[in-house]
Image (cartoon, rainbow, N blue to C red):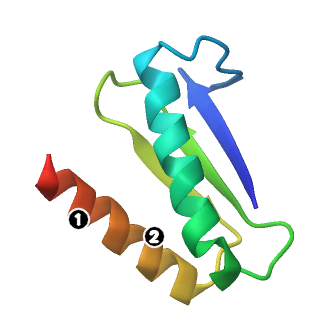
Amino acid sequence: MKLTCYKNGEEIVLQDPLDLDYIEYDVVKDFLKVIGHLEKNPRAKVELDLTEPFLPKYNLVNCNNVFVEKFNQIITRRKFAS
C-alpha cells in the first residue's frame, strides 16, 4: 500500500526527520504496517494532506470498506487520545 503526502494540492517528499509533518507521516506509515494486510488491492493508497498545520486530512483511494473502517477507528481513537 502506498502512502503519499500532499501540501497545498501538490505531492511532497518529506526529508527532514525532525519536521513535525514527518512525524505524522511516520505515524500513519506505522498504522499501515499494522492494518495494511486488510487491504488486498495493489492500487489502494492513503493520501495524507498536510496543508493545514496540525490538522492532517486523510483520503483513502481504492480501499475496501473493512480497511476504511479500521483506519478511521485508529485515527479517531488517536485524535481523542491527544
Residue position for label 1: 77
Whichever of labels 1 and 2 marks the residue nearer the N terminus, that label is 2
Q: Amino acid at mark 2?
A: Phe
Element marked by disc 2 = helix
Residue located at (47% from left, 51% from top): 58
**Image coordinates for residue 39, horizontal then vertical, percent:** 69, 79
Q: Give the quadrant of residue 26.
A: top right
Q: Position of residue 24 (x, y in %)?
A: 44, 35
Q: Which residue is mark 2?
A: 71
Please state if 41 lies on the left or on the right of 49 as rendered: right
The picture quadrant where one finds residue 16 is top right
Identify which residue, 9 or 50, lies in the foreground.
50
For the point 53% across and 37% down, the residue is 25
| Viewer-closest of 25 and 55 | 25
Tell me whether circle 1 and circle 2 mark residues in contact (CB < 8 Å): no
Q: Is residue 33 above or below residue 27?
A: below
Distance between the Cα atoms at labels 1 and 2? Answer: 10 Å
Q: Nearer the viewer, residue 14 or 7?
A: 14
In-image side of 63 versus 75 (left or right): right
Q: Residue furthest right?
A: 42
Residue 52 spot, x, y in % from top left: 35, 25
**Residue 20 horizontal/vertical position (percent):** 40, 20
The residue drawn where x is 25% and y is 56% is 78
